[in-house]
Image (tube, rainbow, N blue to C red):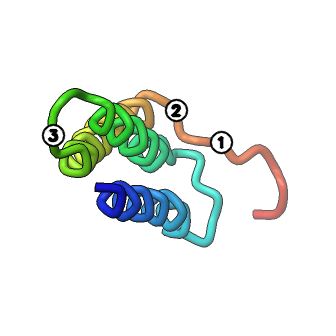
Amino acid sequence: MKKNLLKTLVLVGSVSLFSGCTNNQANPNSGAQTGAVTGALAGSVIGYNTKGHNKGQRAVVGGLLGAAVGAGVGTAVDNNNPPPQQTGGWQ
């Protein structure tokens, strides 16, 4: 059972580390990525701590559901924010 928890934590940790490596420029509209990572971490913790027998499976399912919900909320926030404005410099 501890091996499943370790595998789940390694998977979630690697996803959170590599999710920021998708672009070489600063992206001010990254609410979807932030929401997905935050939701995955929160969902896996909540899933692991619920009552039942298979904690590893519940942690994975909670992480997947949390990532989906977090990405949806982050996308909605990105769509409501105005686009960044260029305020000067060379054109």
- Is label 3 or label 1 in front? 3
Q: Is residue 75 visible?
A: no
What residue is shown with label 3?
53
Check disc 1: other Cα within 10 Å, few if <14, some if 14-19, many if 20+. few
Q: Are marks 1 and 2 in contact (CB under 8 Å)?
A: yes
The residue shown at (50%, 67%) is 18
Where residue 66 appears, x then y in whole percent? 30, 38
Q: Quick one: label 2 or label 3, which is nearer the N terminus?
A: 3
Q: Is residue 53 above or below residue 17?
A: above
Task: Give the CA distance from mark 2 to mark 3.
Answer: 46 Å
What residue is shown with label 2?
82
The count of marks equals 3
The residue shown at (40%, 35%) is 42
Q: Quick one: label 3 or label 1, which is nearer the N terminus?
A: 3
Where residue 35 appears, x then y in whole percent? 43, 40
Instruction: In the rendered structure, find residue 38 and report the number of the disc placed on it.
Output: none
- Is label 2 or label 3 in front? 3
What residue is shown with label 1?
85
